[in-house]
Amino acid sequence: MTNIQSSAVVAETEGPLVPPEPGAATKARPAWRSLNFGPRLWVSAGLILLITLLAFVGPLFYPYAPDQKVGSLYDSPSAEHILGTENFGYDTLAVLMSSTRNSLINGLLAGTLAVFIGVTIGILAGYVGGWLEELLMGFTNIVLAIPSIVILILISISLQSTDIPFLKGIVGLALVIGITSWPWTARAVRAQASSVGTREHIDVAKLSGARTPGILLFDVLPYLASYVVMAWVLQLASAILAESTLSMLGLGPSGTNSLGMQLHWALAFQAVATGAWWAFLPPTIVLTLISFGLLYLQSSLDEVFNPRLRRGKKKNLAAAAARRAENARKLAEQNEREEVTA
Amino acid sequence: MSEQLDTTPTTGPVLSAVNVTKQFRVAGGHITAVDDVSVDFHAGKVLAVVGESGSGKSTLARMLLRLMPVTSGQIMYQGKDVTHIKGGELRKYWTDVQAVFQDPFSSFNQFFSVGHTLRRGMGRQHLSEENLDQLIETCLGYVGLKPADAVHKYPHQLSGGQRQRVMIARALMMNPKVLLADEATSMLDASLRVSALNVLQDLRDNLGLTVLFITHDIGQACYLADEVVVMEHGLIVERGTTDAVIFDPKNDYTKRLLADVPDLKGSLKVRKDG
């Protein structure tokens, strides 16, 4: 549906429906070209790309490692260390880059896990219905009713005392965040899946002999794809924030860098009181930019997928009308000329 | 393709609804959409179910298709009770009983090409790639389409009439014995409607397909059907051969439906005899 509507809108903004001049290639535009990638999308995608580059490419070019002692407690920013040093005497920028990387990985893992669980439960409940829906949604409501921060804190503490190194690090925390943050996604996906499940193409798929897993995967999921992508982006943002909250409270993975851990150490070593802004401001700003970028990306994706929300449409329509008027004028002139010559 | 044909002697009806009732629960009670309806479908005939919106004809079709459970009653197929079959048995039933629905756009998965839509469900038949292409060509041929023009296209690249033809071709791919057309022509414009009706007529004449044709338009029923059943508020109020019901109606409701058809006695009765 989205494709049809969006191409109709694009056709309207593109100008009059005059046939292209003969000889011109009249190949159909690929489907993705008819999507409206507005400026908001480019800004937000650019912001996220920038942060990703800082996290993954930055360390390759920066001379200091995040675990390399280069000074003492809170050395001020200098030409050599742009953001000074933090409480252990490590270069703050080097730590920031490694923290950002860990926070992004954590968000990616946790967000993907939450979306995976939420979509699986939601789609099963919405499509299959009946007692399975009651069961799954009952379970979802129970999970929703439990304050997730309490669960997060309890599991994080118990993870700290495990012997499994894999669960102690950022991955363990991502798992905890992932398995506590899926219920909203499950609810929303259930609502959409039960609506898609009553459409005629599902009946046709059944008549074609498709089995339930096939129907879920090929007939229901693609219709929810735009929603799932947006939910995933939102889950990324909230997972990164959840990790920071926990780490700042001292419940984060010990011995690894993350934006929350940076804030935790800054608090513990009185950076705010001593005026060492370079210790707490950079992680705060990066955190803000990440969540702003992701939320902005989500709302601009909403515009891409939902043609009714597009901005600048009026302006485009006005431009299209002007083009049409110009073409009509040219046509009239041409007719006049033909009449004169006749 | 013919291995499934004629496994049982065709003495009785191919498909029948026996005392079928469907009730929907609503706030403060229930609505009876289909009330104790019994219909028989005889092999190689077109049976039209006529009635206005809300008369329960589509509900009856969905129950016959086993897409909706019955409240009470039985669905019999070739003498077997299929009211409660599940899983593989139900999928086997769906190879024999196929349907074409009203809305030629929402019947398609918009992410699948026509070729993919047609090939779907053919995995069970274990056909070679060549035979499958041959089958697609044959089935599209029945509805006047060429594979080269259709298989690579997506639903939004086809016109309404073409989409409905592809849907008929899809049903024919399964080599069904019964085809339910639930308002299959009501969203097509007049000229396409006639060509779709002709396709159904040809299928009955050439393939011996049993067709259940559901419509609110008694004129179309007259054009196509051998027998007509008239439904009102979930009840069958009149049934009989097309000639008997249309030209000598006994029931007031049937008379009213007939009065609503423009110019019925004039040009609409153009069906071929025999």
Image: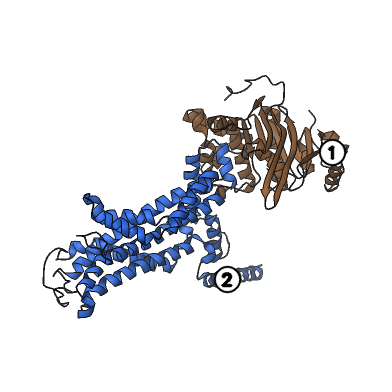
Chain colours: A blue, B brown
- Circle 2: is it few (<14), some (14-19), or many (20+) Cα within 10 Å? some
* B57 left or right, relative to B240: left
Q: Residue A146 occupies which quadrant of the picture? A: bottom left
Chain letter for mark 1: B
Mark 2–mark 1 distance (CA, rounded to whole Å)? 54 Å
* Residue type, mark 2 in image: Ala
Labels in figure, total: 2
- Which structural element holds mark 1? helix
Give residue B200's position: percent from left, percent from top. 69, 35
- Quarter of the figure with the N terminus of chain A: bottom right
Comparing A93 with B210, the one in front is A93
Question: Is disc 2 in contact with disc 1, using a CB cutoff of under 8 Å?
Answer: no
> Does A94 appear above or below B39?
below
* Residue type, mark 1 in image: Ile
Give residue A328's position: percent from left, percent from top. 60, 69
Comparing A102 with A225, the one in front is A102
- Can the viewer see residue A30 in this picture? no
Give residue B57's position: percent from left, percent from top. 72, 42
Q: Residue A230 occupies which quadrant of the picture? A: bottom left
- Quarter of the figure with the C terminus of chain A: bottom right
Q: Which residue is mark 1?
A: B246
* B139 left or right, relative to B232: left
Residue A321's label in the rendered image is 2
Is there one chain holding both mark 2 and mark 1?
A: no
Residue found 33% across the figure and 66% down from its top:
A290
